[in-house]
Image: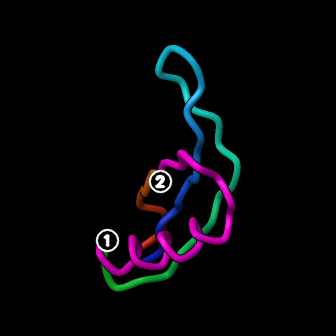
Amino acid sequence: MFYEVDFCIPLEKGNFKTIHTELIASEGVTQCKEVADEIAGRLDEKDLRIFIGDFIE
């Protein structure tokens, strides 16, 4: 399955700005989160939020 993952930073009033989007192929959400965490570590942002959404089965 493919997941669309947005890497975002928080703005004021609960809004977020997407700084990077990645398509990740994985067997499930847990594996996708592990890959997303690795990518997040390379983005050099302090308060990064990760949003995972289904893309294609």
Residue 35 x, y percent position in the rendering:
48, 78
Query: Residue drawn at (68%, 63%), measured in percent from left and top?
Result: 43
The answer to whether residue 2 is magenta is no
Q: Is residue 11 left or right of residue 30?
A: right
Residue 7 x, y percent position in the rendering:
58, 53
Query: Residue drawn at (65%, 43%), measured in percent from left and top?
Result: 18
- Name the one closer to the observer, 12 or 3: 12
Range drawn in magenta: 29-49
Residue 27 x, y percent position in the rendering:
34, 85
Residue 31 x, y percent position in the rendering:
35, 81
Earlier residue among tags 1 and 2? 1
Labelled pair 1, 2 in contact (Cβ < 8 Å): no
Above or below, 27 relative to 50: below
User: In this figure, what is the number of numbered marks?
Assistant: 2
The answer to whether residue 42 is magenta is yes
Helix, strand, or loop for circle 2? strand
Picture quarter with the C terminus: bottom left
Q: Residues within 10 Å of mark 1 (few under 14, many from 20)?
A: some
Numbered tag placed on residue 29 in the rendering = 1
Q: Amino acid at mark 2?
A: Ile
Q: Is residue 45 left or right of residue 50?
A: right
Numbered tag placed on residue 50 in the rendering = 2
Above or below, 41 relative to 14: below
